[in-house]
Amino acid sequence: MPQDRDTLVEDTYAEGFRSIYAEFLVTARDRTWLDHCCHAVTGHASSTILCDSEAGVSRVLDGVTAGQKTPDGRMGAIIQVHVPRFRKDRLVHLERVLLARISQNVLTCPTARCFNRIDSPEYFKLGRKVAFFGDGHQFRDVRYGTKGWVVPTMGGEFYLTRRFGFSDGVMGGNLWFMATSEAASIDAAERAAAAVNQVDDCVLTFPGGVAASASKAGSRYSFMIASTFAEYCPTLKDKLGAQSRVPEGVASIMEIVINGSSLDAVAQATYTAIDAALSAPGLVRITAGNYGGRLGKSFIYLRPERQGAQ
């Protein structure tokens, strides 16, 4: 049975921050090649600490049933790619990220196609840029009800839409699962991640959706912008003494990080994740990381009634 929310869930908030993000659909002939494409295009995109972006799969579509149809009727996956809004070069950077990821990881994947998902007043003319790979043999066409570019390849043809839009989003929603063992904290985090994966408009970016290395901003080393959150490392509890913030009986803490299309979307995914994890054996506490508003102003309160009172 699920444990009591008020007992396990700390009355705190996750500190998110604003992003701009692109969303596109990749399709392929079957689940095997769709998964290969998704793994490649979202690779090395766990954290903008040292990755060029944060990317993940928002939803997998079967291509044919109501609510899951794709332009070409094949299996597909909706991908979100986020960059922090505080970057002064955010538009140029996001376009560069999309160009690299689509041209190097979608175009190269057998049977893959790529379709824009955001219609915005401003947009990137990305199709034309990717199509230059055709070396003059590329051409415009209207296929699957969309305007796009066709690039001849040795495997056949690659199709992608002409324009790719972008929108404001939220990054950095997070939950920490404190448990009596590593196995127990992973179990709780896996349950939460699986639940978020069923929620539209949000993505998890870390391997399997779970991070074992929640970080704090800054470091004792001047060349590091983030470092391990020592006060929450269970193996440092004795060394740190009174400075340790690890509750009694906690041997491991796993984190999930949620990015999404809006603060509301991230909040709803957060509550879905909490509900899914409450029944995990060995769970001691669910909490979240925040820095008193120094990182961002997009607060996701772990108690739903607090969120609505903002």
Image (cartoon, rainbow, N blue to C red):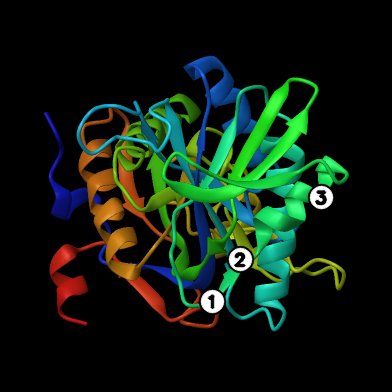
Q: Earlier in the sequence, mark 3 or mark 1?
A: 1
- Residue 228 is left or right of residue 100, and the answer is left
Horizontal and vertical percent position of residue 214: 57, 52
Label 1 CA crowd tier, 10 Å (few <14, some 14–19, many 20+): few
Q: Which mark is residue 202?
A: none
- Single out the mark in the foreground, 3 or 1: 3
Circle number at residue 132: 3
| Mark 1 lies on residue | 122
* Residue 49, visible in the rendered structure: yes
x, y percent for residue 61: 36, 32
In front: 157, or 284?
157
Q: Disc 2 on helix, strand or loop?
A: strand
* Of the image marks 2 and 3, the number of the one nearer the N terminus: 2
Label 3 packing within 10 angstroms: few (<14), some (14-19), many (20+)? some
Q: Where is residue 80 in the image (x, y as percent from the top left)?
A: 50, 52
Measured Cα–Cα span from mark 3 to mark 1: 22 Å
Q: How far apart are marks 1 and 2 (CA)?
A: 17 Å
Q: Seen in the image, is 42 located left or right of residue 132?
A: left
**Residue at figure coordinates x 85%, y 68% from the top left:** 221
- Which badge, 1 or 2, is on the more N-terminal residue? 2
Label 2, label 3: how far apart the Cα atoms are: 25 Å
Mark 2 closeness class: few <14, some 14–19, many ≥20 residues within 10 Å: many
Amino acid on which disc 2 is placed = Val
Considering the numbered disc 3 on the image, is that residue within a helix, a strand or a loop?
helix
Identify the element where label 1 is drawn.
loop
Question: To which residue does mark 2 refer?
Answer: 83
| Disc nearest the viewer among 1 and 2 | 1
> What residue type is disc 1 on?
Glu
Whether residue 240 is visible: no
